């Protein structure tokens, strides 16, 4: 049986599945391992099942024992892993697409609603008590008839588009390539971000974090938006240059943000804390029991498929 290091505690059903599939090393206390601990613990292992909290950079990958042949990431995103370094060392990297699209799209919609309808301020006022209803109390932005720009029209973006359309939003999107008519479902394609941002009353960031998308929201691009636009991010923190966005929020160029992800998680840039219209969640995108089990099971299956066939359909490098 192949020996696999599993860096974070999984939900019981998935740990049981892992035990039936290979010889796992579990992390029963769910300790956050340092990079050097991952390297030490992987001695004698054939693969590692990592989570998005494991930073598998070039240095760490180069120190892994030669017996490691697969890094199976328990996430759809894989910005935590240096894919080239892994490839050079003969390690395949896999991810868990599809199974988390619905759960993540739900959080994407929650971010849009929360930011547009001032949920952060509303929750705080309700908890404090003493608030007074008035005709203009916590007036937010209605979704009906509002233009939603989707940056990255993959599975999560398409699901957000479908729900947002049913709420009366008009969908625009930018993607590396234009979708077929049936996938587009009436959404309007923009072949560059300037064109998309300039019609986005609300933006939903759904694209992967890559070298090309890193800091795509920055000092220059934030000016492309209509005044009072709302930016939401359900993808990865690396796509936003926080200082530029916080400055735009303080100038009211951007009215509100909805973030499920941000740079340096769990440490939020303190500039956001002073912004009342910032609706921020602690990376809950895939956090439902069914989804987390499906993701972990797929991460296990990816390893199994690789050792049985020498390849894996969810290989990303
Ligand atoms: C969650 O953020 C994931 O990438 O799976």
Image (cartoon, helix red, strand yellow):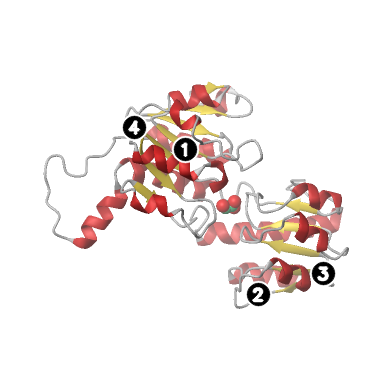
| Relative image position of residue 237 (x, y in whole percent) | 54, 48
**How far apart are labels 3 and 4 at the CA level?**
53 Å
On the rendered image, what quadrant is the N terminus found in?
Answer: bottom right
Residue assigned mark 1 = 204
**How far apart are labels 1 and 4 at the CA level?**
15 Å
**How far apart are labels 2 and 1 at the CA level?**
35 Å
| Relative image position of residue 179 (x, y in whole percent) | 60, 26
Label 3, residues with CA under 10 Å away: few <14, some 14-19, many ≥20: many
Residue assigned mark 3 = 45
Label 4, residues with CA under 10 Å away: few <14, some 14-19, many ≥20: some
| Tag shown at residue 281 | none
Q: Earlier in the sequence, mark 2 or mark 1?
A: 2
Residue assigned mark 2 = 27
Residue ID at (32%, 46%): 277
| Relative image position of residue 244 (x, y in whole percent) | 46, 39
Q: Is residue 236 visible?
A: no
The mark total stands at 4
Q: Earlier in the sequence, mark 3 or mark 1?
A: 3
Secondary structure, mark 2, is loop
Residue ID at (83%, 62%): 68
Residue 190 vertical position relative to residue 309 in the rendered view, above or below: above
């Amino acid at each position: 049986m192949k020996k696999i290091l599993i860096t974070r505690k999984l939900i019981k059903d998935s740990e049981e599945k892992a035990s039936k599939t290979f010889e796992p090393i579990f992390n029963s206390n769910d300790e956050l391992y340092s990079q050097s601990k991952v390297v030490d613990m992987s001695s004698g292992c054939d693969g590692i099942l990592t989570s998005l909290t494991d930073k598998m950079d070039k240095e760490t990958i180069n120190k892994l024992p030669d017996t490691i042949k697969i890094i199976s990431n328990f996430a759809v995103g894989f910005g935590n892993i240096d894919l080239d370094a892994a490839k050079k060392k003969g390690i395949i990297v896999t991810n868990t697409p599809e199974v988390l699209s619905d759960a993540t799209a739900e959080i994407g919609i929650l971010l849009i609603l929360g930011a547009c309808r001032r949920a952060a301020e509303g929750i705080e006022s309700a908890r404090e008590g003493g608030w007074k209803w008035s005709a203009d109390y916590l007036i937010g932005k209605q979704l009906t008839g509002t233009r939603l720009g989707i940056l990255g029209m993959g599975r999560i973006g398409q699901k957000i588009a479908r729900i947002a359309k049913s709420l009366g939003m008009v969908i625009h999107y930018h993607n590396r390539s234009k979708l077929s008519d049936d996938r587009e479902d009436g959404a309007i394609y923009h072949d560059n971000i300037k064109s998309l941002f300039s019609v986005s009353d609300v933006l939903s960031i759904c694209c992967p974090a890559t070298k090309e998308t890193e800091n795509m929201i920055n000092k220059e691009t934030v000016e492309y938006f209509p005044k009072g636009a709302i930016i939401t991010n359900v993808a990865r923190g690396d796509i936003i240059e926080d200082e530029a966005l916080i400055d735009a929020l303080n100038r009211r160029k951007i009215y509100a943000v909805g973030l499920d992800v941000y740079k340096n998680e769990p440490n939020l840039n303190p500039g956001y804390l002073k912004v009342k219209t910032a609706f921020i969640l602690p990376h809950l995108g895939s956090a439902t029991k069914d989804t987390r089990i499906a993701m972990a099971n797929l991460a296990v299956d990816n390893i199994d498929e690789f050792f049985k066939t020498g390849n894996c359909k969810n290989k990303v490098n």
